[in-house]
Amino acid sequence: MLLHDAIAPLKCPQLPLFGTTDLHAVAKGFAHAPALQLRQSWLPEPEPDFAPGTVRVGWHGEVLMILAELEDTDVFINATEPNQRLWELGDAFEIFLRPRFHPAYTELQVAPNNLRLQLNFASEHALAWTRKTGSIDDAIVQDIIFTSRTWVQPENRRWHVLAQVPLPAVCNYTGALGGSVWHFSFCRYDYTNGRAEPVISSTSPLTQPDFHRLNEWRTMEFV
């Protein structure tokens, strides 16, 4: 049995209409959506520099809506263009999505300055090839397939991400969202000036610090 089949699925609710330019309106729209905590489940205790984060999910129409609130004492950005290797260039919020029974999966990343990286992996074998070659070129999706907005609040030591992911963005999915079942994971790279390596975390119960352990992602049902 896969781990995501052993844990009760997350119930992903329909959200009301709300404005997406105002953070207060966005937060109100997600008020009744389930909240997931970013953790370092592969460690017995979090690293001393670990900063908490919360991710909420819902859907409206045929669009998956994701809101992340990330505590951060040092919002760190070196990314300058879309589809750069954001996870190597500073803070990044990552979204992994895979419709149930599909071999392919999608990885979407957002930096605090709202630059995005879009990747589609045809299968786990495609990921293995990417890791062997060290190149993500074959996985990059050039056309804009999802939208996002970020709010950076250094005075509150945090930043927020709102991501809106239409159905076709995820492995060219053509089914209806309501009633469907997907595997998912939300993850984070948290960089800090003066620290050589980022602190990483995930909403999945990972047993190793590897975000691509698909068998350990959770499952959500769109209700």
Image: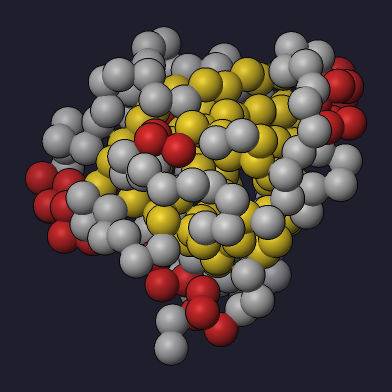
Res. 191 visible in picture: no
Quadrant of the snapshot with the C terminus: bottom right
Q: Is residue 186 left or right of residue 49?
A: left
Quadrant of the snapshot with the N terminus: bottom left
Res. 141 visible in picture: yes
Residue 193 rendering spot, x and y as whole percentages: 59, 28
User: Foreground: 213 or 122?
Assistant: 122
Q: Residue at horizontal 25%, vertical 47%? A: 121
Q: Residue at horizontal 55%, vertical 66%? A: 218
Q: Is residue 80 left or right of residue 84?
A: right
Q: Residue at horizontal 16%, vertical 60%? A: 125
Q: Residue at horizontal 17%, vertical 42%? A: 134
Residue 170 rendering spot, x and y as whole percentages: 39, 41
Instruction: Tell me which colouring the rendered structure shows.
Output: secondary structure
- Quadrant of the rendered image containing residue 168: top left
Residue 124 rendering spot, x and y as whole percentages: 23, 60
- Quadrant of the rendered image containing residue 81: top left
User: Foreground: 178 or 144?
Assistant: 178
Q: Is residue 104 left or right of residue 198?
A: left
From what the image shows, is residue 174 above or below residue 146?
A: below
How many badges with numbers are in the image? 0
Residue 149 rendering spot, x and y as whole percentages: 63, 19
